Image (cartoon, grey):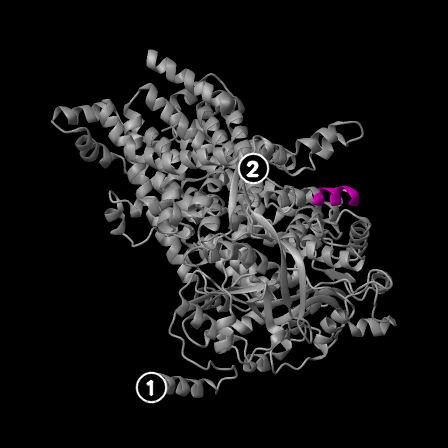
Amino acid sequence: MKGRTFALFVAPSLAMMLIFIALPLASVFWQSFHETRAVVTRTEVESCTPGFLAPTCTRETRTVPRIGADGRPVTETVFVGLDVYRRVLQTDAVAKALGAGGGGLSAILGIDFWKALRFTLTFTLITLPLVIGLGLLIALAVNNLVKALRGPAIFITLLPFIITPVIGALSIRWLFLGDGILTRAIEWVLARDISMFAQGWTIEIMMLIYKVWHVAPFAFVVFYAALQTVDQDTLESAIVDGASRLERLRYVVIPHLMPLIVFVALIHLMDSYRVFDEIVGFSAQAHVLSLQYLTYSFLTPDETGNRAVARAAASSMLTMIGIVILLVPLLMRTWRTHRSARRG
Amino acid sequence: MIRKTLAAAALSLMMSVSAQAACGFQNTVPLKSLTAAFEAWKAVTSAMAECGNVQPELDQTFRTKQPAAFAANPSLYHIGGVANGTLTPLVNAGTIRPLDDLIAKYGQNLSPNQLIKVDGKTVAVAMMVNAQHLVVREDILKELGIATPTTYDEVLAAADKIKASGKVQYPLGATFKAGWDLAQDFNNMFVGFGGTFIKPDNTPGMNSEAGVKALEMMKKLSAYMDPEFLVSESTFVQKQLQQGKIAMANLWASRLGALDDPKESQHVGKFGVAAAPKAMPGGPSSSTLWWDGIVIAKNISDAEAEAAFRVAMEGIDEEMVKANNGLAVWLIKGYTPNKMAQGAIETARGGAPNYASTTAMGLFHSAVGEKIADFMAGRKDAKATLAEMETSYLVKAKEQGLVK
Amino acid sequence: MATTRTLAHPLWLKLTSNGFLMLWLVAAIFPLLWITLMSFRAPVDALSAHPLDVIFGKTTFDHYKAVWVTHGFWRNFLNSLMITAGVVTISLTVGTLAGYALARANSNLAFWLLIMALVFRALPHSVLVTGYLPPFLNSRELLAPLWESGLTGWLFRLFSDMPPTLYGQPWAIILVLVAINQPFTIWMMRSFFMNIPTELDEAARVDGCTHFGAFWRVIMPVMWPGVITTGLFSFLLAYNDYLVTALLLDAQSQTMVPAISQFLNRDTRASDQIEAIAAAVSITAPLFLLVMVFQRQIVSGLTAGAVKG
């Protein structure tokens, strides 16, 4: 394909990605080094609020934003270097924690950013093997099923995957919240009162269960599709060689699935690194934070209507650096394949 | 014109058959409102909707949406429902209009007490006051021979007795939902222990003895609550009371109507109210006083603003109050305080201050809300939590130019 | 096909395998089934401490009526419909072209484009939203020069008199979601195209077709399974999105998923909670139909394309 034709075909897609992904990324990068502040003045203000019988009026000196000629508050934007990053990473607090008697690691994990990083990483790494294992088991089990029942089984299996994540999380939450049916079931089994939403670790476990429930069907459908293309000749010759079921699985089926296991692992890595909907669905923010939720919370206006855009930008950049690091091994591999493909 | 008036009159005649108050004029301008979602707002917005062409939106998270929606040009909403805290961002951003002209034209029925003034200009019209104060199950207290507590030490003692009696699942409830609600309860307790929110140089006062005492008292109270208290907002507490799961709570005055609603509550008529308990002898009632009211967006045409204001006035008129007397402590003519209103009135008499509509107070509230859950969940001690709140406040205050 | 004799399973394996599958299927469907049941019950039964009350309680449609009629959920439904349809259409059109070109080119440029797309795919969406929010809120001022300048002003004024505020505009969200979805779409389409032998388009080119002609007349007809599979993923992304739509759309243009938080937040009575559940079930129902219709295509599409790539 010639360069010009290639460019024409790729142009619309590339343009959209540049405008809506690369450009915002550049602007986020810029914002993370700058801070926009309201210009304030101190003035004497008389204000009245209702009382029970008569209004109470007070005169006091307040700091108020200066309103410009256009009726909007005047702001100034200044370059602050790495200040914002220091504030997000809370380097002072980390240094203090590492110092003598500072509390060490547990103190660091109490700081928002590090707390979010810890949760995001453990969440990603714990769910990864569970998702692949469960997906594979379901795929094998469905493959062993009589043909007539496979359709309904696939249908039901796909449901948790296609359901809206926030709603999936909500539906699991409703089963546990307060005196939800599953909480009562566990209470009945353990014969004691439990509260699933009273402490962080139970919420984390529920979120893990939810994530595996939600993503395993995706692993399943990819693996199941691939199982349909296992080379039957190899399988039969393995049987002739006297290979047991387990050996056949290990030496024929798994190697066939390997590229897909990598594919599923990769997609899952990217998706669970983005963990966010789960925290919303489980209202877990009091106990657990994820990197993406942290950015979101910076972006949500506070009681004064202000959005901490600079800190959101800095935490975004840090989040991005994290995912690039996780992806490096894969990128190297792809680069090697590409080089050898071009040479060959 | 005459025909229009006649049509409106005919319509109002027809409507007056229904129990709800009808609107005094026929509104033709499409209007939208964004308010909180508790019962008083449901009553006010449905009274406004009767004027026609009004699309009310009720949302308990209006707080985070309002600033951006009003900053858009044209504004996404015409009428906004605000309270002390939520007024601040709108005033700061200059996205609501002064109402003095409109009040002169259409506000004959307003009392001076309803006008919220900043720098001499009326920016909002209040319709009700609100405060968190004590709600108790009188029948249980009487049966156990406990007097209605007036201090938090008495609350703890009473909770102990109620727990021992096994009458309810948990003796206490509170609006301890992590974030805004929990922070508001801290503010109340902080007032009770004589704390100062903001010092004259705009630095915060939470990292002090009063702050430590407030946190510790909240921790003590939480031991008598449903362990899932960090998800417990006003509705959660309201349901706990309605279903007889708890015997005492500090709850908003605006929630009391639902407690005596036979459709919802299993214990109608058994509730009593009292002032918010004092935290220390001789101190003020541990609460802050709030108002709720109406603002009109700036980025809309004058004709729209006029229609919006007229509709709003219809929403907060005497007829609406008479039909919904028990839902709130109204500031509107025609309101007769009932037994439940005594809680808020006693709390004000007990010296609870107004919640300040200032940027600094908003930052204080946000900073407390961000960090306080760590303490309540037992992940950090009081000193460390307060220090973090202070840092968080200072970071934000610097971003907004309040402190150097 | 394998002989049944050699691959037949012993009884114990069949039992464990089927038993395990049964367990999974129950786990997969139970939460959905349960909330569906709850949505049809009066609050007393739905929130009752006794499971049997939920199962055998009196059926009521009140909550659905409240959600769809009283609270106007149909408006959110239409918004969802519009945004999802827009995203799927544009996403597939743009992505198919790019995917085809990338599958047929083996240059370094193509490689780096793909790697860039991969990194973009991995970006947490909040990173992007951070970038969108300020310009979306202030777009009227930012875009004003385009409207005022003599060169471009007349063109833009054809669409509207004044520059739009992008915040709360459904078509702006469609573009955002398409862009976010592009990396996945082009990777997926590329791997489908890789499976179509180059000889096919070469033959068409010999017959005198242009590149685009070959693509349209020869390649596309055999590409439908791939297009449907990729389209389904685009559909899910657009329909299920919470973060982007919650932050960039206002309440009036809101899609169903973020709108549900309003139901949760207006929760001041017991019936409000069941209404939230009814809204959740309403959101899930179209997805349910979607899987029913396209289940075969998902599996065969993956078998044919992505799986090998």
Which residue shows up at 16% across the image and 27% down it?
C204
Q: Nearer the viewer, residue B349 or C36?
A: B349
Give above or below for B82 relative to C28: below
* Disc 2 chain ID: C
Which of the image's four quarters has the N terminus of chain B? bottom left
Check if residue A279 falls in the magenta segment. Answer: no
For residue B262, which quarter of the picture? bottom right
Q: Mark 1 or mark 2, which is nearer to you?
A: 1
The mark found on residue C16 in the picture is 2
Residue matched to label 1: B3
Pointers 1 and 2 in contact (C-beta within 8 Å): no
Query: Does the image show residue A193?
Result: yes
Q: Residue at x 63, y 45 (%)?
A: B397
Measure the alpha-carbon separation of dots 1 and 2: 81 Å
Q: Residues within 10 Å of mark 2 (few under 14, many from 20)?
A: few
Horizontal and vertical percent position of residue B53? 40, 72
